[in-house]
Image: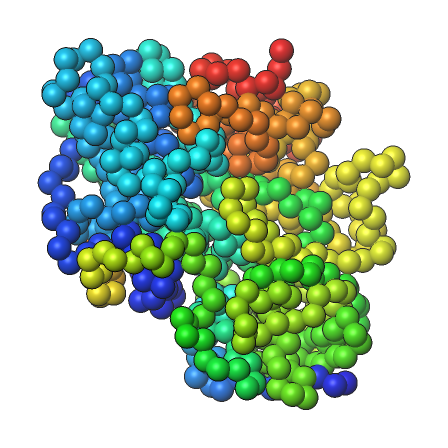
């Protein structure tokens, strides 16, 4: 027995809860490596586009995306 | 409300979408409002709105201007398409990212909006894709229709492709959703539920809108809707409790006042021989092979049986290829298995997944970092033969499910598929053939029963397996099996025979063809058949009625659709 299992901080567990998807959470919040500097560009997400194409208009804030998704749900299931 | 619940679960993905999606696919503050709200040009409207069925296709890289999706004069039969990672060109109040096109907009892109001479399209399909930013080598990736073939091209053609001169095509208006590259490339499905759920909601919203426009021509019409989702996932609940299955079941059970019958058609998946399923009882061990040079994390789920909350914790001993081992704890939530230096070798998450009010299934998810991290300074784990031993006190039996982690054809290889290892479970039968359903009792820990697509775990979805054309009804060896060993509710051929792989399907442009295989191609064949049957007025409310209509199912046999008839190209399945 040379490996140790330790529970994560409650905040990390609460992030996933009983309904969350652990692998999605892992990709968004990968475990740190002792002694390694924090990632400059965030977690290693499966990004496929080229960063040099980033010069476009400022995107809507996330709240706009949430509002659009809610509007889509209303269009599908509303009266 | 299941849709809202899904969005809440993936709220962080919505928040951090700029880190995932192509920047130009996010709606910018200065995007002009979309003005065209019409669905189909009059030339593409069904002759008889009372005898039509809407076909929806949720897939990847769907060539929405393909000639098989047009009328004889070139007008689009695609009433609406949401390209989820295409450059956002305008703003609609209910499109959060990407680009939506309506049928009339596609026609305008091709010069069919009255600007031509009236004899046909002025511009070809590629010009339409180029105008939408979908043929742009400099873009890097995202909704790329510059390739020769795509999964979505094959599936859309099988589900709804008609010769433009065939008037039957107009009885099947199409609604499509092209899923993002970054979601499809990640075969573990980590982000896809957000985009899939949004796609299903979009399909229902636009189908309702299209139904209203059909009612303007024929009052009282409630067109049926058949949704094809040829996507699959290996691990996950297959008991109907996943939000994806719940949403589809809820819509199919109560389609609302605008639509007739709604069916969701999904493949059973291609994982029967993938050695990704097993059943353990306490004290039993199974090997877990993690391949080298895997740039993505590998995950495995251990599901206990349904029980009253709180669930009995699933606990395992995890042993590395070098023999070092550690036991997971009984505390619900997240934990980490670390070496003495503090390096995380596995993350564990113990959850009680709700399956019914007051009832849960305990689920332990083990996530192992990549064996070849793509960025320095990130966690990694050793490749090789790991071992999992179910500890005493755990519930029994425990279902083990390896999460999918391979690469889709056409994408850069990042993930490499892990698999289970059990010497008592033979890969081939005594004759050297691929084995079928599990014998009773099973001959090892690894199972072939229960290898079906976990997206298709609902109670109302129509699950389609792959057969071979010759001999008629023979089962393709890769086709996933339901828990009871059946190959699905219906099968349809995706291979000519066990020795002659695949079938001929259209590519992205014109007459381009390719040969593909898999249950992804079987599902749209049933979608096509079902849409035609519903348009003809047949009442097919559920699985049993559909099975009876497809064919003989005496002795519990799964009916086979047989080689498709009336396709506007030669499939190579027969002849």
Quarter location, residue B170? top left
* Residue sitting at x 42%, y 29%: B508
B573 relative to B128, above or below: above
- The percent position of residue B220, horizontal first and vertical second, equals 19, 28
* Residue sitting at x 33%, y 11%: B165
Left/right of residue B28 with respect to residue B307 in the rendered view? left
* Residue sitting at x 70%, y 36%: B477
B544 relative to B441, above or below: above
- The percent position of residue B310, horizontal first and vertical second, equals 55, 76
Left/right of residue B317 with respect to residue B124 in the rendered view? right
Quadrant including the C terminus of chain B: top right
Q: Nearer the viewer, residue B479 or B369?
A: B369
Quarter location, residue B47? top left
Left/right of residue B23 with respect to residue B550 in the rendered view? left
* Residue sitting at x 58%, y 74%: B379
B495 relative to B394, above or below: above
Coloring basis for residues: rainbow
Quarter location, residue B272? top right
- The percent position of residue B564, horizontal first and vertical second, equals 53, 19
How many badges with numbers are in the image? Answer: 0
Quadrant including the N terminus of chain B: bottom left
Whether residue B154 is visible to the viewer of this picture, yes or no, is: yes
């Amino acid at each position: 027995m040379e490996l140790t299992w330790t529970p994560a901080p409650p905040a990390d567990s609460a992030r996933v809860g009983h309904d969350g998807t652990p692998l999605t959470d892992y990709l968004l919040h990968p475990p740190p490596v002792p002694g390694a500097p924090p990632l400059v560009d965030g977690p290693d997400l499966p990004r496929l586009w080229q960063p040099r194409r980033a010069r476009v208009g400022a995107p809507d804030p996330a709240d706009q995306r949430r509002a659009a998704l809610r509007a889509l749900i209303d269009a599908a299931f509303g009266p | 409300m299941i849709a809202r619940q899904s969005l809440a679960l993936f709220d962080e993905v919505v928040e951090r979408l700029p880190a995932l999606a192509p920047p130009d696919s996010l709606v910018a503050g200065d995007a002009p409002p979309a003005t065209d709200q019409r669905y189909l040009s009059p030339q593409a409207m069904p002759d008889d709105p009372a005898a039509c069925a809407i076909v929806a296709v949720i897939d990847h890289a769907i060539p929405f201007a393909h000639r098989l999706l047009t009328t004889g004069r070139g007008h689009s039969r695609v009433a609406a398409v949401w390209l989820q990672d295409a450059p956002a060109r305008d703003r609609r109040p209910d499109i959060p990212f990407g680009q939506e096109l309506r049928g009339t907009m596609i026609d305008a892109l091709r010069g069919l909006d009255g600007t031509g001479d009236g004899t046909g399209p002025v511009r070809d399909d590629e010009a339409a894709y180029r105008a939408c930013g979908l043929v742009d080598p400099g873009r890097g990736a995202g909704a790329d229709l510059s390739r020769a073939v795509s999964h979505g091209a094959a599936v859309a053609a099988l589900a709804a492709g008609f010769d433009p001169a065939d008037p039957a095509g107009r009885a099947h208006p199409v609604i499509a959703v092209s899923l993002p590259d970054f979601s499809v490339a990640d075969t573990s499905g980590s982000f896809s539920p957000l985009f899939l759920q949004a796609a299903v909601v979009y399909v229902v919203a636009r189908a309702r809108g299209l139904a209203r426009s059909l009612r303007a021509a024929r009052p009282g019409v409630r067109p049926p809707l058949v949704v094809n989702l040829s996507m699959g996932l290996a691990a996950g609940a297959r008991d109907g409790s996943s939000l994806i299955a719940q949403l589809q079941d809820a819509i199919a059970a109560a389609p609302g006042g605008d639509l007739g019958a709604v069916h969701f058609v999904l493949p059973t998946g291609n994982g029967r021989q993938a050695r990704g399923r097993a059943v353990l009882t306490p004290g039993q061990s199974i090997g877990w092979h993690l391949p080298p040079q895997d740039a993505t994390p590998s995950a495995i789920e251990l599901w206990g049986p349904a029980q009253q909350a709180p669930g009995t914790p699933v606990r395992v001993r995890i042993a590395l290829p070098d023999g070092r081992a550690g036991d997971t704890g009984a505390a619900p939530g997240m934990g980490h298995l670390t070496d003495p230096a503090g390096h995380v070798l596995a993350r564990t998450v113990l959850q009680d997944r709700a399956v019914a009010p007051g009832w849960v299934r305990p689920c332990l998810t083990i996530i192992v970092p990549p064996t070849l991290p793509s960025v320095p300074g990130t966690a990694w784990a050793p490749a090789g033969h790991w071992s999992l031993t179910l500890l005493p006190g755990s519930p029994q039996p425990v279902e083990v499910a390896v999460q999918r982690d391979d690469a889709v054809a056409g994408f850069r290889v990042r993930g490499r598929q892990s698999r289970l290892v059990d010497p008592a479970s033979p890969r081939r039968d005594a004759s050297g053939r691929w084995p079928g359903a599990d014998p009773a009792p099973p001959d090892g820990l690894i199972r072939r029963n229960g290898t079906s697509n976990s997206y298709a775990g609902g109670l109302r979805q129509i699950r389609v397996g792959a057969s071979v054309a010759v001999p008629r009804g023979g089962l393709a060896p890769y086709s996933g099996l339901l828990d009871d060993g059946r190959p699905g509710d219906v099968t349809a051929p995706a291979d000519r025979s066990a020795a002659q792989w695949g079938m001929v399907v259209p590519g992205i442009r014109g007459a381009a063809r390719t040969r593909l295989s898999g249950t992804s191609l079987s599902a749209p064949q049933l979608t096509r058949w079902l849409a035609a049957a519903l348009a003809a007025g047949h009442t097919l409310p559920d699985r049993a009625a559909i099975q009876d209509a497809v064919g003989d199912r005496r002795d519990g046999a799964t009916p086979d659709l047989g080689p498709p008839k009336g396709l506007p190209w030669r499939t190579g399945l027969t002849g």
